[in-house]
Amino acid sequence: MYAEGDHTPVSRDKTDANVFGHVLDISTKEHLPYVTIQLKGTTVGTTTDATGHYFIKNLPVGRFAILVKYVGYKTVEQEVLLEKNKTI
């Protein structure tokens, strides 16, 4: 099932291209829980856990922008190159 919108479904073939990290408040250096992490223009994403960490696995390969969204904060966009069998 797909909803109409500006997001493109992405083929989910196993690639073992993975992204992991954490999200911090730049002023306090505290980890932020439940932040939305999304591959821009796709339906692929996750949220940080209660400790501000995230892990997304088996992503499509290629250049993507990762969007980081959290209520009350400016949205951040980071360009990444996802490669087969690599974790960044």
Image (cartoon, rainbow, N blue to C red):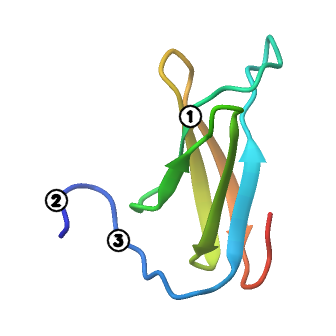
Label 3 sits on residue: 9
Q: Residue at x 80, y 11 (%)?
A: 28
Residue 41 drawn above or below residue 12: above
How far apart marks 1 and 3 lie (CA) works out to 21 Å
Does residue 39 appear anywhere in the picture?
A: no
Q: Residue at x 56, y 23 (%)?
A: 74
Residue 27 drawn above or below residue 49: above
Task: Name the amino acid, label 1.
Answer: Val
Task: Check the picture and name the quadrant holding the N terminus.
Answer: bottom left
Residue 9 drawn above or below residue 44: below
Label 2 sits on residue: 4
Q: Contact, CB < 8 Å: mark 2 with mark 1?
A: no
Q: Quadrant of residue 18?
A: bottom right
The local crowd at label 2, few if under 14, some if 14 to 19, many if 20 or more residues have their Cα within 10 Å, is few
Label number found at residue 66: none
User: Circle 1 sits in a helix, a strand or a loop, which is it?
Assistant: loop
First reached walking from the N terminus: tag 2 or tag 3: 2
Label 1 sits on residue: 35
Judging depth in this view, the residue of 34 and 44 nearest the camera is 34
User: Which one is in front in this view, the residue at disc 2 or the one at disc 1?
Assistant: 1
First reached walking from the N terminus: tag 1 or tag 3: 3
